[in-house]
Image (cartoon, rainbow, N blue to C red):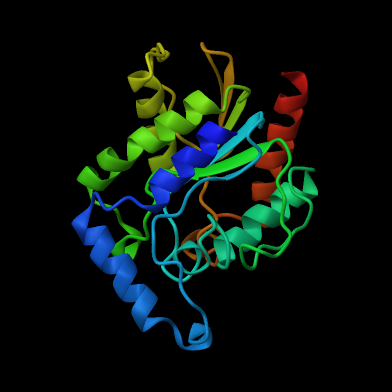
Amino acid sequence: MRALTSLNKRIASCITCPRLVTYRQAIAQEKRKQYRDWTYWGRPVPGFGDGNARLYVLGLAPAAHGGNRTGRVFTGDRSGDWLYEALHRYGFANQATSLHKDDGLVLSDCYIGATVRCAPPGNKPAPEEFEACRPYVREELRLLRNVRVVVVLGKIAFDHYLKASREEGQRLPSPLPTFGHGVVYRLPWNVTLIGSYHPSQQNTFTGKLTRPMFHSVFRMARKAVKEG
């Protein structure tokens, strides 16, 4: 846990990507009207959860007025509302809501990371920003030694989890796993990989992702964790 705490401190102080630094700081100063009384976090957002977790959830990046405001991944936005409600339903969280860093939320047997740790303009990180952040994913995966199930939220997270695994020396299957909602792969390094559409408003408002669809992913994750 000490090593994970150290990693999260390094993540929170990262200034590697000039475009992201400028954007996250500008958002923290401008704020959104309903959050004008908030002191925005305005920094890279570390991972969050149980250091002994068997489940690792990988998302895309913090939201400008979500994680960039609250300082905790998937906290304070509608994507987080969907994620933590599902985690609570299947026993990975002690509550179904995620409002701010001190709201009492505790994860059990679950850890959450992101492929990029700063809020990006238009929710679209640049290729070089993914590359700069992937070492953080790799280090999380090294430190989270008990992980046996990985849920990836969206194709981008799916692809970058596989890239991170390959860079860590893992032998990827051939043919490569392909992304889809609800796909399940048993990887050679004893990890079950589960794909899910990202719970973004673009997906949830259009009906591309429904709550039953999303819940099914974490029902599978809970079953895979139990089976080891």
Left or right, 14 with reference to 215: left
User: Residue at position x 39%, y 66% from top?
Assistant: 42
Q: How many marks?
A: 0
As rendered, which of 174 and 207 lies closer to the eye? 174
**Rendering coords of residue 155 (x, y %):** 42, 41
Left or right, 95 with reference to 48: right
Give the image quarter of residue 165: top left
User: Residue at position x 44%, y 83% from top?
Assistant: 32
As rendered, which of 186 and 129 lies closer to the eye? 129
**Rendering coords of residue 220 (x, y %):** 70, 33
Left or right, 98 with reference to 113: right
State the quadrant of the N terminus. top right
Task: Determine if residue 113 is in view.
Answer: yes
Task: Determine if residue 153 is in view.
Answer: no
State the quadrant of the C terminus. top right
User: Residue at position x 22%, y 44% from top?
Assistant: 127
**Rendering coords of residue 18 (x, y %):** 20, 57
The answer to whether residue 45 is above or below residue 98 is above
**Rendering coords of residue 157 (x, y %):** 43, 40
User: Residue at position x 31%, y 57% from top?
Assistant: 124
The answer to whether residue 225 is above or below residue 169 is below
The answer to whether residue 145 is above or below residue 218 is above
